[in-house]
Amino acid sequence: MKYPPGKLPHGELARLLRSYTDVHPRLVVSPGLGLDAAVIEMGDRYLVAKTDPITFATDEIGWYAVHVNANDIAAMGGTPRFFLSTVLVPADHATPELVESIFRSIHEAARSLGVAVCGGHTEITPGITHPIVVGQMLGEVSPQGLVRPSGLQVGDAILLTKGLAIEATALIAREKGEELRRRGYGEELLDRCRHFLRDPGLSVVRDAHLALRAGRVHALHDPTEGGVATGLMELAAAVGVGLEIFADELYLAPESARLCAEFGLDPLGVISSGALLIGCAAGDAAGIAAALEREGIKAAQIGTVRPEEFGLQLRRSGGLEPLPRFAVDEITRIF
C-alpha cells in the first residue's frame, strides 16, 4: 500500500503521534490532530513553533512559505517573530535568477508581517523537479493569551473569514496560466485570480488578532490542505465535538467558483490558506464578525458546535447531510 499525495490519513497520523511522541514538562501543547503549532514554556512567555513545506507552488513560493507558517502561530493566539527556511532548488533549474526570486519573496513576505528572517539552509538538490521551501516560524504568546482547540465548547458559534479556496485560486491561476489561456481565459480575469495571493491574501494573522480583541474566542484553526471541510474536521477532532455547518453561509468568490468548476474541484476540499476558522461564544459571534468587517475582512457565522454524537453535518435547504470528507486535497487532481 502507498499513501496518496498530501497529508497523511488522519487515522494513521493519530496512530503515529500516539506511538512516537514523548511527554516533556515544558511542552505545553504537544502534537495532535487539529493543533496548529507546538507550544513550549520559556519562563514568563511561551514559544510557539511551526514548520510547514510548500510543495505545490513555484511562483512566489517564499511568500506562501512565510504566510502559511505565520498563520499557524496566529491560530494559537501567538505573534510570529522569526522565520527560518530550508530551500531546495532542483539541479536542472538552479539559475541565479530563480534562487534570488525565492530569497526576495521570503524577504517581502516576512517584512509585511514584521518578522525577522534569522537563518536556514539552501542547497541545489538532485531528484526534484521544482523548488521546495520548508518554512519554520517561531512566535510567542503569553500564557493568558494562548488559544487551544480544546477550548471549543458545545453551543459555540463557528465563524469563517474571507471564504473558500483563496489559496487555490491564486495557485491555479499562477501555475496553470498557459492552460487557462488556451481554454479562453483573458488576462484581466487571470490577473484578478493571481492577485488572490495578496488580496484577500494568504495571511490570517490580522484576522486572528482582531477576533481575539473583539470577543470570547475559544478556538482558532487555519484550514490549508484538504480545504475548509478538512479544517472543520480537524477542529472538531481536537476536542471531540460535532458541528452543524450552514452551506448557504460558505462564501465562495466568483473567481474561485469559476476556476474550481473549470477543473471539477469541490471548493470545500481545496487548499484554503487565507481563511480562518474561529470558534467563539455564541453571544459574541455577531460582534466579532462586525469587528472583522469594519477592518475590511469578510466574516460570517457558518456553523454551530454540537455534541459529538451529532457528527459533522452540512445543513442545506433540503436538510442535513454528512460534511464531505477528502482523503487528499482536491488540488492534487490537477498537479
Image (tube, grey):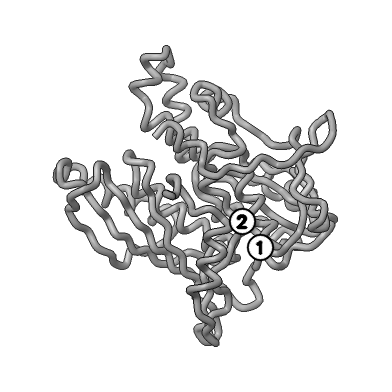
x and y, in percent, of residue 326 in the image: 58, 42
Check the image and name the residue furthest to the top: 184
- Looking at the image, do the residues carrying marks 1 and 2 touch, with CB atoms under 8 Å apart? yes
Q: Which quarter of the picture shows residue 163?
A: top right
Kind of residue at disc 1:
Ala
Residue 254 rendering spot, x and y as whole percentages? 59, 25
229 horizontally vs 139: left or right: right
Closer to the camera: disc 1 or disc 2?
1
Vertically, is 12 above or below 186?
below
Q: Quadrant of residue 171?
A: top left
Q: Which of the two residues, 286 or 24, is positioned nearer the viewer here?
A: 24
Q: 299 or 177, which lies in front?
A: 177
Q: Earlier in the sequence, mark 1 or mark 2?
A: 2
Q: Residue beneath label 2, please?
A: 221
Q: Tell me the tag on residue 29.
A: none
Please give the residue where the numbered disc 1 appears in the rendered image. Answer: 238
Kindly identify the amino acid type of the residue bearing the numbered disc 2.
His
Question: Could you tell me residue 19's position as x and y percent?
Answer: 52, 73
Image location of residue 108, percent across then percent down? 35, 50
Asked which quadrant contains residue 256, the reply is top right
Locate the C terminus by quadrant: top left
In this rendering, the answer to whether 75 lies above or below 245 is below
Residue placed furthest toward the front: 1
Residue in view at x 69 percent, y 67 percent? 150
Q: Residue sitting at 79 percent across and 46 percent down?
A: 244
Q: Left of 245 or right of it: where is 51?
A: left
Picture mark count = 2
261 w.r.t. 114: above or below: above
